[in-house]
Every structure is written in structure tokens, then in C-alpha cells.
Amino acid sequence: MLIFVFAKSTYAQTENVNKYPAPVTFTAEQDQDNMMKQLGIKSLRPGPSGNENAPNHANYDESIANPCPQLPDILTLKNGKKVTSADMWWKLRRPEIVEDFEREVYGRLPKKIPAVTWTVKITDREFVGRTPVIAKQLVGHVDNSDYPLINVNINMVVVLPTNVKGPVPVLIMFGPASLPSPAQPSSEDLAKINAAFREMMIQNNPEMKAVLDKYPAYSPITKLAGPSFFAPAPDGNSAPTEQLLAAGWGYAAIDPSSIQADNAAGLTRGIIGLVNKGQPRKPDDWGALRAWSWGAARALDYLETDTLLDAKKVGIEGVSRYGKAALVTLAFEPRFAVGLIGSSGKGGATLHRRVFGEAVESLTGGEYYWMAGNYLKYGASVATFGSKTGCDLPVDSHELIALCAPRLTFISYGIPEKGDAKWLDQTGSYMATVAAGTVFKLLGVKDIGVSNDYLKEKMPPMLTGLLEGDLAWRQHDGGHTDAPNVQHFIPWASKMLKYNKATK
């Protein structure tokens, strides 16, 4: 019987290999070279070094950081007409901006993407700090019946407080997806487990009986420390997830690498590879940032089926490359109500055409797989079309932030002294945030409360929160994280979403 099953499985695998084209296996260099050939690019400009002592170090001189200071006008149509109403924004200008971003920067979603089926693998009642929760570990299987040679299974954990009334808001967070505090067996059950474990050890190795007889009270498996109800209440130094739960929010953690690998060699695998049946991308195909954001939208699909949460009050959060992905998610998926965008840098909230720290050439170099293939054009030094720079981009990050309007958008950074490097160009992100405010105001909500003159407005001192509008900015005094800003994000978002925690 086992031989038959094995033979059947082997036959199915062989049949798949014969029926479907094998996925291409490229190194990162081979994949980039393939895309350059498609685009007619012969060479790319090298990106700057993050080492300030290196000969090719990144620029940190503000006097030369804006080679093309005039940004694309958010509220001017391509035909030159001014956008003067919300209706013109939604019907005319916003679609123009989306088209440019999809074609030139982040790539397009394929017309046909397989469905995702979510399965709850574990449901556990746990405590996170003082808060009782229901935690679910889920897997989202992407239908691969059209190309069985690639499997994509999205890993996610959903954690909801059980001590509050009514449906709760939820923050989806890009990062590792593991149960926060798995429930421990009772003392009686643990005794049974230890008795069975001791017996199994002796059966496996009879010599263990003599060893265990020396220590009759010894328990091979010990119980982990449980929740401390006498511990201090969560504060701003507590883990962000603990702060969220204590405030009556739930959270979901989704693992980006289970959607699409964070490397160029993985572009013929993951969801991008599955849709392309293992073949290399075309120039306007989506990159990893857009793939991760697609995965977050599929997570929201699942959350919309859970009556314990309010699917109209779901947010997205990420830091660094995942901060880029969180901003892309909020910009392109209108069902998300709020975003916490942490230290996102170039490709996120920072202006592409700024030459300060991380450059366009940084993204067209090692991290090109985050973007559409067409983005490589803006790092080209020799190509059939000549050469291009970030100044040639038809859009910039102020417009990406504007695509989030009028929904809640919190731009967060730390300080270089604590590790949120100058490389990220905090000033360039502030300029983009200032410029994006025109659209928030056009749509009837408040921006960060300053003028929209991005060339004159100066970034406020750290710890100065501009949190009175639907667009928010705050630079904390920590490093490459958004954790110090979570204590400010939660009350801001709760107020704006009109959510008041009510305990049971």
C-alpha cells in the first residue's frame, strides 16, 4: 500500500514536470541582466555607499540634494487643466497617477491572480501581558492548479482581545507570524505528559531508567511562566502588540517571505513566479513591494469574515522595506482605513528625485526586485533610450502619499543618532508629506497643519508630533523602528476612527 502511494505521488510529480514548463532558476545577476536586455539598457549607474568614508559615499549635503526641486504637480492633469474638485481627483487625476506608478515604479497586478483559501491551523486562548486574547494561526493557500510546480502558502497570525465589547479595530503588521504566548497545560496535564515522556525515553534507551530513577521528582518538561496580573500596566515602552491589545485593538502579523521572497533570485517563485508560471518578469510586472501589499489585501479578505473585528477599521503597518510595502498597500487598496508607515525611505515616503543618502541607483541596483522592471530605466547610464535619472520619473512619493487620502496616514521616523540612518532621508519624506497635504485638504480632511510649500517648510524638531489631521507626522527619538511612536499612533487612530474601547 505504501509502495503504491509513493509510486502514485512520484508519477504525479513526473506528470507535472512533463505537462508544465519548469520554472526558470536565475541568480539575481542573471535576472537583472535579463530585464536590462528587455529594456535596452547596457549599463546602470552604481548606487552610492552607505559608508561616509568611502570614495563613492552617498551625498549628505542639502545644498545639492534637490537637482530638480520642482515636483510633479499633484493637482494638474496631464492635459494641463487644474484639479479643482474631489470629483476631478477621483475620476481624472488619481487614475493618471495610479497608471504612472504601476507602469514605471511598482508594477501592475496581473489581470488574473489565483484565489487564496484561508485555513485556521490553530485556535488558542492566551494572555499577552494582562490581556486575554484569542489567537489564530492561519495559512492562506494560493490556488496553484494552473501551475502545480510552485506552492505559495501565506503565513499569518490573528490576535484579538477578548476583554472588550463589540468588534475591534485591527492593525495588520508585516513581519514574523507566530503565536504570541501559547497556552500552557495545567499541572495535572503536565504531569501526564511528563510520565509519558519518561516512559518513552526509557523505551527508546533502557539505560535512561537508571538515570531517571536517581531523580524521581525531576520533570523533563517544565511549565513556562504564565501571565503576571500584578505586572505594571503596559506603557509606551511595552511591545507595540501589547500596547495595541491593552487599548482594545487586535493585530495580525503576516510573513512577507511566505508571499514573495525578499531577493531577486526568487522572482520566478512565490506569487510573482506562480502567476508567471515560473518565467521571468516583463518590464511592467509587479515587484516584491506590490506582491507583499497584495498579500496584505488577501489577509484583509479573511478579516472581513471575522465578526469579532471591525473590517472597516483595519490598518497596515511596516518598518523599513516593510514600511515601503505598507505605504504601497494603503495607496492601492482602498479598504484599508489607516497606515503606520515606519522609516520607509526611498521607494516609500522619501522623494525619488532627491539625492540624499539612499538613491534611485540604490533601488535599481541590489533592490531592483522590489520595483517594476521599468524602474531600472531611471538608473540607466547607457541605453537605447539614452540615460535617465530620478528627475525623469513622471511621479514621486508625494503622490503615493496622496493616493492614501483621505484615509489616515501616519508617517514615522526615528533619528540617525539612534540608528535610523541619514541614508533614509527623513527630510525628503517630510517634504513629500507636506506636498501631499493638498490632496487631503481637497478631499475635505486635515493634513499635518502647515503650508504645502515643500521647499520652504522645515522639518519640525524630533518629538514634535503633527497629529491633528488625517495625515500625521512624528519623528521619535529612537532608532530604525516605529515602536516609540505606537503610543502616539494608537490614540490618534482611535480618535480619528471614532473607536472607544469598552471592556466587558
Image: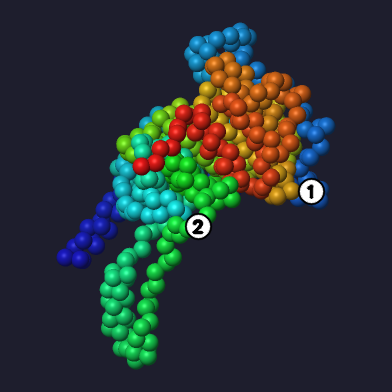
Q: Residues within 10 Å of mark 1 (few under 14, many from 20)?
A: few
**Real-space Cα separation, disc 1 to disc 2, in angstroms:** 45 Å
Residue at 75% x, 29% y is 458
Give the percent coordinates (x, y) of residue 211: 37, 89
Quarter where residue 222 is shown: bottom left
Q: Nearer the viewer, residue 81 or 474?
A: 474
Q: What residue type is disc 2 on?
A: Ala
Label 1 or label 2, whichever comes before in sequence order = 1
Residue 231, disc = 2
Q: Is residue 307 left or right of residue 312?
A: left
| Callout 2 secondary element | loop
Q: Quadrant of the C terminus?
A: top left
Q: Nearer the viewer, residue 300 or 54?
A: 300
Q: Nearer the viewer, residue 332 or 416?
A: 416
Q: Quadrant of the N terminus?
A: bottom left
Give the residue at the far left of this rendering. Answer: 1
Quarter where residue 413 is shown: top right
Q: How is the image coloured?
A: rainbow
